[in-house]
Image: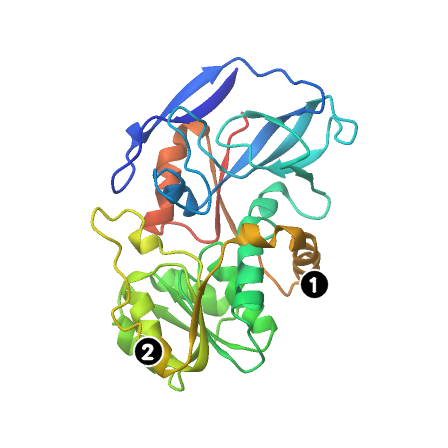
Amino acid sequence: MNKQLILAKRPEGIPDASTWTLESHTIPTISDGEFLVQQHYVSLDPAMRGWMNDSKSYIEPIAIGDVMRAGSIGKIIKSNHPDFHIGDTVTGWGGVQQYAVATDKTWYKVDTNLAPMPIYLGTLGMPGMTAYFGILEVGKIKTGDVVLVSAAAGAVGSIVGQIAKLKGCYVVGIAGGKEKCDYLKNELGFDATIDYKSENIFDAVKETCPKGIDVYFDNVGGDILEAALSRLRMHARVVICGAISQYNNLEEVKGPRNYMSLLVSRATMQGMIVMDYAPHYGKAAKEMGQWLMEGKLKSKEAIYEGIENFHETFMRLFSGDKKGKLVLKVIE
């Protein structure tokens, strides 16, 4: 049987366990040009919260009654496709389920001799691609830039900061709690950190970035975005990747009150969606893969087990109770 997590209703505020139902159905059959993937891991990402809303976005919302959308990785166990064979490891958009019918349009092969499966959902997957193109193409970092990163211990932020260091930037990471801040400095090589849980964010940004900020990579929105805008240098770049502090709001999203600082500093603020860079994923994966092999880039995955534990694991995205990429193992 195929265990599937089905979207049962659209959440208001923080999703509770009744947002989904866990169902078991017969493992699907495949047609010509398709292959069947036994999924090993699914990716848990903040963007999933937005996909459950019935509102205009960069992607269609998940329909009520559909499998919860998620990136995934697994092995092909049946194939009617000439280029995909039994035993191949593939990654794509399989959703939160144990088996997925796939085609060559949305799936591609990966080599687990080079990296284990979970890394292809993190550093060599969507979060890594987001970090790579967000900081290099949108942030346009250059040597000597002061780079501030929010949610810096997370899947995207941790890679953003490391890439910025590789490119010769001074990097400040914002995270919640001493343990995460120590991780950023001692393991990932960030120059300075801010613990938003124990420090005044405006004072801390001023202290750690006394000359101002050239690039702010935003994953959280809210007060932290305002604090960053208050310290922009001339021609600074603000990359809007996400706003996790606002995703479960029951009220209107809180926008920055001090946006006029963009005008004063002649700065730019630009949103980025990683799917726009899909034609160039291969280039990014090759370069980041090389950095991983050389020990210049570190990848961390927080792996939990059991499709039955999806809700509990998913909530770690919003509680902050994890470091690195959040992954759920669904194979039994």
Q: Position of residue 187 (x, y in %)?
A: 52, 65
Q: Quadrant of the C terminus?
A: top right
Q: In the picture shown, does residue 159 fall above or below 125?
A: below
SS at badge 1? helix
Numbered label tally = 2
Q: Residue at x 66, y 55 (%)?
A: 280
Q: Which of the two residues, 13 or 289, is positioned nearer the viewer here?
A: 13
In percent of width and height, residue 105 lies at 65, 36
Instruction: Tell me the SS state at disc 2.
Output: helix
Q: Is residue 329 visible?
A: yes
Q: 123 or 302, which lies in front?
A: 123
Q: Nearer the viewer, mark 1 or mark 2?
A: 2
Residue lying at the far top of the rendered structure? 26
Q: Position of residue 287 (x, y in %)?
A: 69, 60
Rendering colour mode = rainbow
User: Which residue is most to the bottom?
Assistant: 211
Q: Are marks 1 and 2 in contact (CB under 8 Å)?
A: no
Of pointers 1 and 2, the one earlier in the residue sequence: 2
Q: Is residue 215 visible?
A: no
Circle 1 Cα neighbour tier, 10 Å, few/some/many (<14 / 14–19 / ≥20): few
Give the left or right position of residue 209, taking residue 222 as reference.
Answer: right
Query: In the image, what residue occupies the spot 31% across and 72% down?
Result: 259
The quarter of the displayed image where residue 102 is located:
top right
Q: Nearer the viewer, residue 168 or 269?
A: 269
Compared across the picture, whether 150 is left or right of 85 comes to left
Indicate the amino acid at tag 1: Glu
State the image quarter where residue 174 is shown: bottom left
Query: Relative to 194, does residue 74 appear above or below in the rendering?
Result: above
Residue behind mark 2: 261
Residue depicted at x 44% and y 53%: 323
Q: Which residue is mark 1?
A: 294
Mark 1 and mark 2: Cα distance apart in space: 40 Å
